[in-house]
Image (cartoon, grey):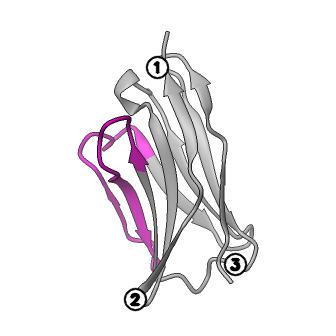
Amino acid sequence: QVHLVESGGGLVQPGESLRLSCANSGGIFSFKVMAWYRQAPGKQRALVASITAGGQTDYAESVQGRFRISKDPRQNKMFLQMNSLKPEDTAVYFCFAGLGSVGSWGQGIQVTVSS
């Protein structure tokens, strides 16, 4: 059973940081890949960052150098550390987990960057 739950979103000012978490009570060890996506108003959902079972990471160009994806199987969690946030980072952020040909999504969490 996969049930992804995001936490850590909120309202911050430009330049500040947030750390998102994605938890699955059934563990994350078996997932082939986990990722963060985001969807801004009026835009399509887009990949932000991904991490494979082996720990290989990939980032969207727009967040390269500012965001860091990680995971801790002992906590059954994946994280997204977001630094130097910009207003254009404002979006609903979704956690994704892939297991073979099947993928699961979290419910999403709002991140708003505004002065």
Q: Is residue 35 left or right of residue 22?
A: left
The Cα atoms of the two marked residues, 1 and 3, are separated by 33 Å
Q: Are marks 1 and 2 in contact (CB under 8 Å)?
A: no
Q: Which residue lies at the image location 23% right of the left edge and 45% below the top edge? A: 61
The mark lying in front, picked from 1 and 2, is 2
The span shown in magenta is: 38-67
Q: Amino acid at mark 2?
A: Ser
Q: Nearer the viewer, residue 71 or 28?
A: 28
User: Residue tagged by mark 1?
Assistant: 15
Rendered position, 85 above or below 82: above
Q: Amino acid at mark 3?
A: Gly
User: Residue tagged by mark 2?
Assistant: 101
Q: Which residue lies at the image location 38% right of the left edge and 37% below the top edge? A: 40
Is 44 contained in the magenta span? yes
Q: Is residue 21 left or right of residue 68?
A: right
Q: Which residue lies at the image location 39% right of the left edge and 45% below the top edge? A: 39
Badge 1 local density, few (<14 within 10 Å), some, or many (20+)?
Answer: some
SS at mark 3? loop
The Cα atoms of the two marked residues, 1 and 2, are separated by 38 Å
Q: Is residue 111 left or right of residue 10?
A: left
The mark that comes first in sequence, 1 or 3, is 1
Q: Quadrant of residue 1?
A: bottom right
Q: Amino acid at mark 1?
A: Gly
User: Residue tagged by mark 3?
Assistant: 27
Q: Nearer the viewer, residue 71 or 88?
A: 88
The Cα atoms of the two marked residues, 3 and 2, are separated by 18 Å
Count of numbered circles in the view? 3
SS at mark 1? loop
Q: Quadrant of residue 78?
A: bottom right
The mark lying in front, picked from 3 and 2, is 2
What percent of the width, then of the height, locates residue 89? 40, 32
